[in-house]
Image (tube, rainbow, N blue to C red):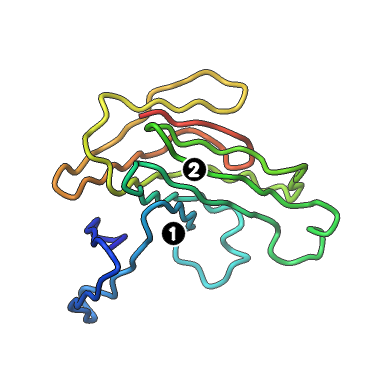
């Protein structure tokens, strides 16, 4: 359950209580990375400059992968290469983002990474450091829930329109 950090080995059938107060559980397959924008808005146009959160669900070997595609959400300019496309991967306690192909979003909205949530990390890291593309590593604030095995990294200080790495 991506919201509560509970894991279920599958394939399995799971029954859970869901009501107006607890909400509906959301499950994420181990080995995946899902980017989200978590601010409540009336429409997607209002979200263009909102920061991203990455939900990283580790597989049994501690790896995960995903992608981020970003454009203006309105025009056909993507056909001329006006978009960003990044590959996201985690292995050996290192999360990284690297540009795919020659994409180059010129939309004017430089969004930042606000939070990383790693599900299934077996032990707390001693430290977390973030390195933007072409920059120096800097420490990041984090919390770790040992019961749920969930690491939350807050404001890692990297932009989502360039490559970066986060070591834990």
For residue 33, above or below residue 133: below
Quadrant hosting residue 167: top left
Rendering coords of residue 22 (x, y %)? 21, 73
In the picture, the quarter occupied by the N terminus is bottom left
Q: Secondary structure at mark 1?
A: loop
Q: Which mark is residue 38?
A: 1
Q: Which mark is residue 113?
A: 2
Question: Residue sitting at 73 percent across and 67 percent down?
Answer: 74
Q: Is residue 95 left or right of residue 126?
A: right
Quadrant hosting residue 132: top right
Rendering coords of residue 49 (x, y %)? 59, 52
For residue 132, above or below residue 35: above
Rendering coords of residue 105 (x, y %)? 74, 47
Judge by depth and name the residue closer to the eye, 3 or 120. Answer: 120
Q: Residues within 10 Å of mark 2 (few under 14, many from 20)?
A: many
Question: Residue sitting at 49 percent across and 57 percent down?
Answer: 37
Q: Secondary structure at mark 2?
A: strand
What residue occupies the far left of the structure in this picture? 147
């Amino acid at each position: 359950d991506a919201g509560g950090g509970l894991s279920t080995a599958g394939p399995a059938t799971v029954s859970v209580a869901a009501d107006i107060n607890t909400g509906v559980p959301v499950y994420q397959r181990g080995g995946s990375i899902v980017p989200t924008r978590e601010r409540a808005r009336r429409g997607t146009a209002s979200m263009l400059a909102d920061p991203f959160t990455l939900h990283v669900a580790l597989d049994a070997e501690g790896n995960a992968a995903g992608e981020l595609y970003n454009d203006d959400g309105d025009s056909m300019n993507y056909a001329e290469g006006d978009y960003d496309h990044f590959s996201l991967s985690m292995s050996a306690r290192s999360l990284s983002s690297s540009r795919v192909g020659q994409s180059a979003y010129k939309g004017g909205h430089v969004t930042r990474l606000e939070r990383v949530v790693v599900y299934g990390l077996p032990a707390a890291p001693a430290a977390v450091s973030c390195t933007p593309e072409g920059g120096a590593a800097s420490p990041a604030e984090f919390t770790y829930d040992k019961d749920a095995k969930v690491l939350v990294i807050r404001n890692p200080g990297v932009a989502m329109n360039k490559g970066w790495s986060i070591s834990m």
